[in-house]
Amino acid sequence: MQHTDPAREYVRALRGFYLHLATYLIANLMLFVLDVLTPGGPWFYWPLLIWGIAVALNGVTVFMSGRFFDAEWENRKVEKLHGRGAHAGHA
């Protein structure tokens, strides 16, 4: 079994997020230009909104989740439940 490096995993996730964000920006700019140049009502905001939610969720998973629920957090919680943590509530 191969052990993965958490730092390498984070960098890969970060690279994936930046590629996702760049693709989102470029594609939605092209959709906006296409919408402006073609007849009919504006529609570009729908993919902008829906895809934007996906980009935001991707960003939250990359930037937030690892900091709150990482292995160190798990270790602190286990120690607290075993009464060895600083805030275990035992005298």
Image (spheres, helix red, strand yellow):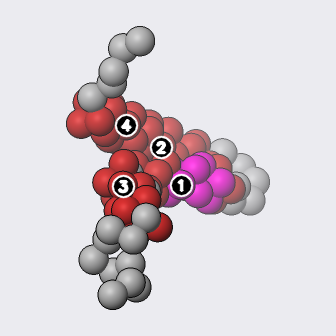
- Kind of residue sitting beneath label 2: Tyr
First reached walking from the N terminus: tag 2 or tag 3: 2
**Picture coordinates of residue 86, whole percent (x, y):** 27, 77
First reached walking from the N terminus: tag 4 or tag 3: 4
* Whether residue 54 can be seen here: yes
What residue lies at 44% left-to-right and 39% top-to-bottom? 20
Q: Nearer the viewer, residue 73 or 89?
A: 89
Residue topped by disc 3: 75
Q: CA distance from mark 2 to mark 4?
A: 16 Å
* Circle 2: element type: helix
What residue lies at 36% left-to-right and 48% top-to-bottom? 71
First reached walking from the N terminus: tag 2 or tag 4: 4
Magenta residues? 48-57
Residue topped by disc 1: 57
* Circle 3: element type: helix
Q: Nearer the viewer, residue 26 or 34?
A: 26
What residue lies at 58% left-to-right and 57% top-to-bottom? 53
**Picture coordinates of residue 32, whole percent (x, y):** 54, 50
When asked about the image quadrant of residue 13, the answer is top left
Q: CA distance from mark 1 to mark 2?
A: 13 Å
Q: CA distance from mark 2 to mark 3?
A: 37 Å
Residue topped by disc 4: 13
